[in-house]
Amino acid sequence: MKMNESMIEGRNPVIEAIRAGREIEKILVQDGLKDGPVLTIKREAAKREIPIRYMDKERLDQISEIGKHQGVIAYVSAYAYAELDDLFEKAKEKGEDPFFILLDGIEDPHNLGAIIRTANLSGAHGVIIPKNRAASLTATVARTSAGALNYTPVVQVTNLTRTIEDLKKRGLWFVCADMNGTVMYNLNLTGPLGLVIGNEGEGVSRLVREACDMKAAIPMKGDIDSLNASVAAGILAYEVVRQRIGGSNTGK
């Protein structure tokens, strides 16, 4: 696949992109910066023969797409979407049951980036997003993921409901976040699993919800009735982690 050029902004995202072996054309660095992360970028770039250009902050501000470059911008090949088989292969390489996070209607790139970060840290083997009415992979997503996008494959599909049905045939069970569902502690979230997260406004759409085997509710004690999507994803993903580490006494 031929990929267009894009940018990664921020010190840690650039460091992670270099270390992950991303194809980097050049790195722009603000004149005069000599702190630890910038020195690390210079050292890692030298090892890989990545050219560095120096310029003043005003010029970097003009180039920046998100306005938070921290004095460093890298030009890289755009992020390519993975295939579903890549996620299964990743699980196989680790000797683990597949664990995928599917997103339904997540349109905020900051939420998408945060969920990709959570997916990586919770051991999910990939993230699945729909093509329509959803955030796609952008510089903002890359930066918000804090480098996790370099390690966590993201698959883009045409129809999320159909994808769930296809993945069921490959052995996965599906649980979606639903405030009217069963308290998450009372569900068996071990084994091959797809975790579905909807947006905080409408939640998981009806057809996707009906395709899921389980509905998981997060216990809440406050005065409002919804969580930010990335927070909900983190809570549920780490309940999956807890059960995988300690086991579950509930049955599917």
Image: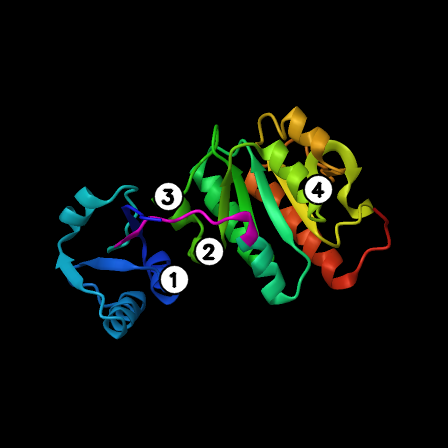
Image-based side of 44 in relation to 93, left or right = left
Marks 4/3 in contact by CB < 8 Å: the verdict is no
Residue drawn at x 13%, y 56% is: 55
Residue 136: image location, x then y, percent? 43, 38
Residue occupied by mark 3: 140
Query: Which secondary structure lies at badge 3?
Result: helix
Q: Quadrant of residue 164?
A: top right
Residue sitting nearer the eye, 204 or 72: 204
Q: Amino acid at mark 2?
A: Ala
Stretch of the chain drawn in magenta:
75-85
User: How far separated are the C-alphas under marks 2 and 4?
Assistant: 24 Å
Query: Which secondary structure lies at badge 4?
Result: strand
Q: Is residue 152 visible?
A: yes
Looking at the image, is mark 3 or mark 1 earlier in the sequence?
1
Marks 1/2 in contact by CB < 8 Å: the verdict is yes
The circle on residue 16 is 1
Residue occupied by mark 2: 148
Q: Can residue 22 be found in the magenta stretch? A: no
User: How far separated are the C-alphas under marks 2 and 3?
Assistant: 13 Å
Residue 126: image location, x then y, percent? 55, 51
User: How far separated are the C-alphas under marks 3 and 1?
Assistant: 15 Å
Q: Amino acid at mark 3?
A: Thr
Residue 104: image location, x then y, percent? 57, 34
